[in-house]
Image: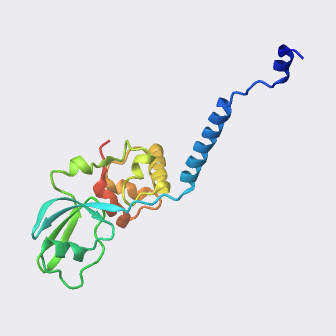
């Protein structure tokens, strides 16, 4: 046999680069799928409150959701009154602590409110923006927008009482977060 015949009989060496790239791509996909299937650890909910009173400096505080009113009195170095409600007010509220007295709560009235908690113009807001207001869920936001489209703008907060599902107590809950300009 000649040398030329021997070379033809030998198989040519294969290029393994495409196979290596395919295996590497499959490995990357498996790692991403494994991470995607792991449950994400939820971040603990927090709330923003404007606090004043006691040894606490007046200002905006980020508090864990598990914090109670008694915890705030202890941190401020004040005597907590008996019968104190454990729950803190909603995020965006102002809380003034008094030594031995019940805390005064209300909507934020300090100068920083426009920077952090701007009122939403209910006559111009869409469903997604209305859902960000405490007390308004997706279904209620849809009803507010639908009622506004059918009957015109809300001129006063009491105009929202015409929307199904909104009563005086619920209106009082989200009134500080809404603006009624035409």
Expressed as whole percent of the image width and height from the top left, the position of residue 36 reads: 55, 51
Q: Residue furthest right?
A: 1
Q: Residue furthest bottom?
A: 82
Give coordinates of residue 104: x percent, y percent.
Answer: 18, 70
The quadrant in which residue 170 appears is bottom left
The residue nearer to you, when weighing 13 against 56, is 13
Is residue 30 positioned above or below 52 on the image? above
The residue at 61%/44% (across/down) is 27
Left or right: residue 55 compared with residue 150: left
- Which corner quadrant holds the C terminus? top left
Residue visible at 85% across and 22% down?
Answer: 9
User: In the depicted view, which residue is nearer to us: 156 or 172?
Assistant: 172
Q: From the top left corner, tell me how far across and down residue 151 is, in percent.
A: 44, 46
Q: How many marks?
A: 0
Q: Nearer the viewer, residue 108 or 144?
A: 108
x and y percentages locating residue 12 in the rendered image = 77, 24
Does 14 sit left or right of 171 as displayed? right
Chosen colour scheme: rainbow
Query: Looking at the image, which residue is at 49% across and 47% down?
Result: 146
Q: As drawn, is 116 to the left or to the right of 123?
A: left
Q: Residue at x 41, y 57 (%)?
A: 136
Quadrant where the N terminus lies? top right
Residue 47 or residue 148, whichever sits in front = 47
């Amino acid at each position: 046999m000649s040398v030329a015949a021997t070379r033809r009989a030998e198989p040519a060496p294969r290029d393994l680069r495409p196979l290596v790239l395919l295996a590497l791509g499959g490995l990357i996909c498996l790692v991403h799928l494994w991470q995607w299937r792991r449950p994400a650890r939820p971040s603990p909910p927090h709330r923003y409150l404007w606090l004043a009173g006691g040894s606490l400096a007046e200002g905006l505080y980020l508090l864990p959701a598990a914090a109670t009113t008694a915890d705030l009195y202890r941190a401020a170095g004040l005597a907590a009154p008996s019968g104190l409600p454990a729950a803190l007010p909603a995020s965006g509220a102002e809380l003034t602590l008094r030594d031995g007295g019940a805390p005064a709560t209300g909507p934020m009235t300090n100068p920083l409110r426009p920077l952090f908690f701007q009122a939403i113009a209910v006559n111009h807001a869409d469903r997604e923006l209305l859902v960000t207001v405490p007390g308004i869920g997706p279904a209620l936001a849809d009803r507010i927008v639908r009622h506004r489209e059918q009957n015109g703008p809300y001129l006063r907060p009491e105009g929202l009482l015409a929307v199904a599902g909104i009563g005086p107590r619920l209106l009082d809950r989200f009134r500080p977060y809404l603006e009624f300009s035409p």
